[in-house]
Amino acid sequence: MSVPISIRNITKKYGDTVVIPDLSADIHDGEFFTLLGPSGCGKTTLLRMIAGFIDIQRGTIAFGDQVINDVPVNKRDYGMVFQNYAIFPSMTVEKNVMFGLENRHVPKAEAQRRTEQMLAQVKMEHLAKRFPENLSGGQQQRIALARAIVINPQVLLMDEPLSNLDAKLRIEIRQVIADIQREIAITTVYVTHDQEEALSVSDRIAVMNHGVIQQVASPESIYRRPFNQFVAGFIGHSNSFDAVVVENVGGQATVRLEGGYTFAIDVLRRDVAPGTHVIVSVRPEDFTVHDSPSGLSGRVRLRQFLGSHVQYNLDNDSGREFLLNQSADFGTRLFQPGDVIHLGVDSRAVNIFDATTSETLVEGVLSNVIGSPVTEVPAS
Ligand SMILES: Nc1ncnc2c1ncn2[C@@H]1O[C@H](COP(=O)(O)OP(=O)(O)OP(=O)(O)O)[C@@H](O)[C@H]1O
């Protein structure tokens, strides 16, 4: 039976180097929870602490009500899928999947039945008698997944399971993983540094940097309402403009960008005073192109056709570069290097960050990190 995982005040040091200073998180029963962050941010370390390969120096990790700090690796009730498949080369596909059941002394007939059922679920029943060396990487990872979940563990742990596969197989296998995870509703902790992968499969994502969770939220919230500039820049691309709040009457605000372009927004926290220096963050797809010379101007430096859209590298009046994405529909006007494009911003889609703390000033957006201060939003 699947259980929630509770992580409280976890610390990890290697010598004097603190890799995880103090981390807490709640992973809900049955959810697909992804640890996402740049290389070296500590996501594998955290996963390996849950798995029991790395000691928990301080803090606790619990599966349901059971604190597992002192439970040995082989007594923790999880299935794990690794980057390098880690299936036994000397055993057939069928034997690989059955291995965990035999270890748990499941009666032979039942073990056989569950193995067949599992192989059908990962669409590998026709290859049951093959040896791993005769399987592709994608097929090996299907077997690794089957082997991890056939034992009905409380938790499924996955450490960059797709990173050895080519781009097309990555998409195919991530759909297999997401489908099966939803079907059996097992609490899953998934580590990746690939943002598209995280956005596509997760119920919630924890974005990490330097051993600290920056934000925990749904993929849509992480992308649309990042809690700070790190999250905004790590997930997709964000253009940042220096700006100042001109007026703010109960959250109905006017903001002026460097260069003078001024626009109205209604999502600013109402406690942000006029005169406050802010960073306005705009996704490349959240500009509108003006026919008349008004708004924000950018001179085209480079145009790249990317299939579904055209990407322009533009220079603003101060010579700073920013990106614009336009759909590549038939009939969309293409600009040439040297052209000046006049733009407005979709004010619902912009994000505004405090220039000093880098944290969001959009009303109601929280980091949802356990233990972090909750910003009070005044009642209307
Ligand atoms: N055994 C070790 N001794 C010393 N430092 C280590 C050890 N293992 C990991 N580290 C350091 O701890 C930090 C976190 O490593 P970790 O592998 O958890 O990061 P990660 O986010 O999973 O990165 P990647 O995606 O590259 O695997 C890194 O700076 C790494 O160099």
Image: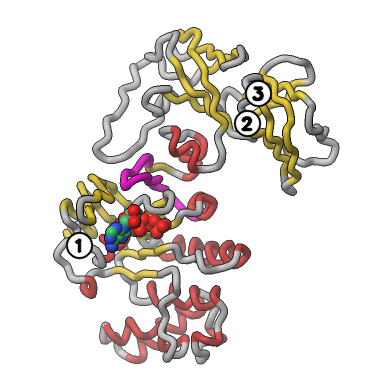
Residue at the disc numbered 2: 322
Residue 88 in magenta stretch: no
Where residue 28 appears, as percent x and y from the top left, is: 32, 52
Query: Tag 1, which secondary structure?
Result: loop
Name the amino acid type tagged 2: Phe
Which segment did they paint magenta?
201-215
Disc 3: CA contacts within 10 A as few (<14), some (14-19) or many (>=20): some
Q: Is residue 126 left or right of residue 354?
A: right
Name the amino acid type tagged 1: Asp
Residue at the disc numbered 3: 316
Question: Please, what is the dominant secondary structure of the magenta stretch?
Answer: strand
Residue at the disc numbered 1: 55
Give how far apart the Cα atoms at labels 1 and 2 are. 45 Å
Give how far apart the Cα atoms at labels 3 and 1 are. 51 Å
Q: Quadrant of ligand 1?
A: bottom left
Where residue 42 appears, as percent x and y from the top left, is: 33, 53
Query: Tag 2, which secondary structure?
Result: strand
